[in-house]
Image (spheres, helix red, strand yellow):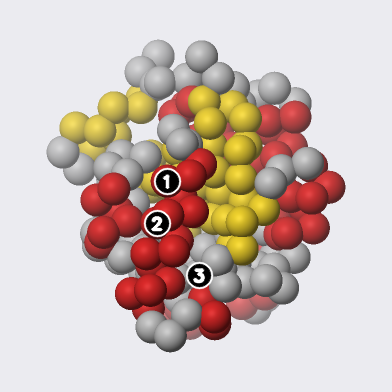
Amino acid sequence: MTKRIAVLASGRGSNFQAVIDAITAREIPATCVALITDNPKAYAIGRAEAAGIPVKVVDYASFPAREAYEQALLAAMRECHADLFVLAGYMRIVGPEIVRAFPGKMVNIHPALLPSFQGLHAQRQAWLYGVKVSGCTVHFVDESLDGGPIILQRVVPVLDDDDEDVLAERILEQEHIAFPEAIRLFCEDKLEIVGRNVRIRK
Ligand code: GRF
């Protein structure tokens, strides 16, 4: 059956676009029912509009405190009746109440090979550290920071002449493959979480 997915994004939305394109190409058996953003200036909004996807803006700056924002975000998410929430460059930590509301129903993409280089600026962290390979990780979201069960990873080399931006670009190309692939597997009911492991059914 076709799944309902909702995407949370704060900015550029290139991963969101990769998901839209994969749905349009019928590679993912899903309908994207909403883009939810905390940023009324997010470039992702125009991408949603161009694809005819409803936009819900929950403007972080318009709330007096983080708790009030989280309550509004939770309400917006519940309204979606989504089978899966996709964090595609959503630049805030998802609070524990929201994580608990949608167990096993939220995925994130991180631009490094977790558990290395968690948190912000993962590409810069990897480049500064001097690793020879990095990549991206798609994982389920739990209450830890970038620590939920890993669905899949893709590896890229770090080359001598790279700077942080070149490396980020090389990783991004792989993100645009990995994220739609992981979402497809979810939507085909092929993912099973067993403790920390995610089994992929054939
Ligand atoms: C990506 O690098 C993603 O891994 C990270 O935030 C960035 C979002 O880029 N979580 P975009 O908005 O999808 O273009």
Query: What is the residue that sits farthest to the right in this orientation?
Result: 50
Q: What label does residue 91 carry, if any?
A: 3
What's the amino acid at mark 2? Answer: Leu
Report crowding for label 2: few under 14, some 14 to 19, many 20 or more residues within 10 A (C-alpha).
some
Residue 164 in the image: state x and y as whole percent.
Answer: 61, 77
Q: Residue at x 39, y 21 (%)?
A: 190
Disc 1: which residue: 78
What's the amino acid at mark 3? Answer: Met
What's the amino acid at mark 1? Answer: Arg
Closer to us: 92 or 138? 92
Q: What element does badge 2 sit on?
A: helix
Q: What element does badge 3 sit on?
A: loop
Answer above or below: position of 77 versus 160.
Answer: above
The mark closer to the camera, 3 or 1, is: 1
Q: Does the closest atom of ligand 1 sit within 8 Å of the Cβ of label 3?
A: yes
Disc 2: which residue: 74
Give the left or right position of residue 143, taking residue 150 as reference: left
Badge 2 vs badge 1, beta-carbon distance below 8 Å: yes
